[in-house]
Image (cartoon, rainbow, N blue to C red):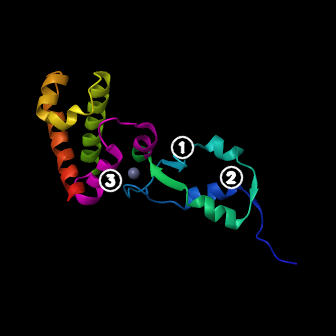
């Protein structure tokens, strides 16, 4: 008789997994409030509690590869941001991994770019115009004067990211 691994409820595995995570897997920040992301979706406590199907260790190990523990900031960008013009997720990773910027500055850049993306979307800015129009023209045409400088600074950073990506 083969000895199979003990079956446990998935929720039990998930809770153990959650408790074992100490750092955000995207930005490396120590996790105080954590979001558990499974297949691109945040699963909250209530959802975890309902996951009572019994699984064994091999199944769990497979599922685990699709799980990520993220801080609130990263999970918000990962799950709730669907930018049209900017690759905000990759930009954020770039700032964390390739620059010495502190997290609050990174956050500020990301928020600005996100807002800019919203503004462009609201204005139906044609994505192909991006090829011909410089950010400068784009800003002049699409943005109100207030805060334009902040956007400009964020865009300059984004251009550095694009250069880095292309290199
Ligand atoms: Zn994070």
Q: Is residue 17 left or right of residue 33?
A: right
Q: Which mark lies nearer to you, 3 or 2?
A: 3
Q: Nearer the viewer, residue 49 or 115?
A: 115
Mark sitting earlier along the chain (3/2): 2
Give the position of the C terminus as an image quadrant. Answer: bottom left
Crowd tier of the residue under label 2, counting other residues whose Cα lies within 10 Å: few below 14, some 14–19, many 20 or above: some
Tag 3 and tag 1, C-beta contact below 8 Å: no
* Residue 94: x %, y % from top left: 28, 54
Residue at 68% over, 67% down: 58
- Residue 89, numbered label: none
Mark sitting earlier along the chain (1/2): 2
- Residue 41, numbered label: 1
Q: Is residue 139 left or right of residue 73?
A: left
Q: Which of the 4 image quadrants contains residue 118?
A: top left
The part of the chain drawn in magenta is 75-102
Q: Is residue 104 magenta?
A: no
Q: Which residue is mark 3?
A: 93
Residue at 79% over, 72% down: 4
- Residue 11, numbered label: 2
Tell me, yes or no, if residue 143 can be seen here: no
Which element type, helix, strand or loop, lies under badge 1? strand
């Amino acid at each position: 008789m083969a000895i199979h691994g003990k079956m446990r409820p998935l929720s039990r595995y998930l809770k153990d997994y959650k408790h074992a995570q100490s750092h955000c897997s995207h930005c490396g920040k120590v996790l105080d409030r954590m979001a558990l992301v499974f297949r691109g979706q945040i699963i909250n406590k209530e959802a975890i509690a309902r996951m009572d199907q019994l699984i064994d260790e091999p199944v769990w190990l497979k599922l685990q590869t699709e799980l990520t523990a993220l801080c609130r900031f990263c999970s918000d960008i990962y799950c709730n941001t669907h930018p049209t013009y900017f690759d905000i997720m990759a930009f954020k990773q770039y700032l964390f991994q390739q620059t010495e910027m502190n997290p609050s500055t990174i956050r500020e850049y990301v928020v600005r770019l996100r807002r800019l993306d919203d503004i462009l979307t609201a204005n139906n800015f044609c994505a192909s115009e991006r090829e011909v129009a410089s950010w400068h023209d784009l800003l002049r045409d699409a943005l109100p004067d207030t805060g334009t400088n902040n956007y400009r600074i964020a865009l300059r950073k984004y251009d550095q990211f694009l250069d880095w990506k292309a290199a």
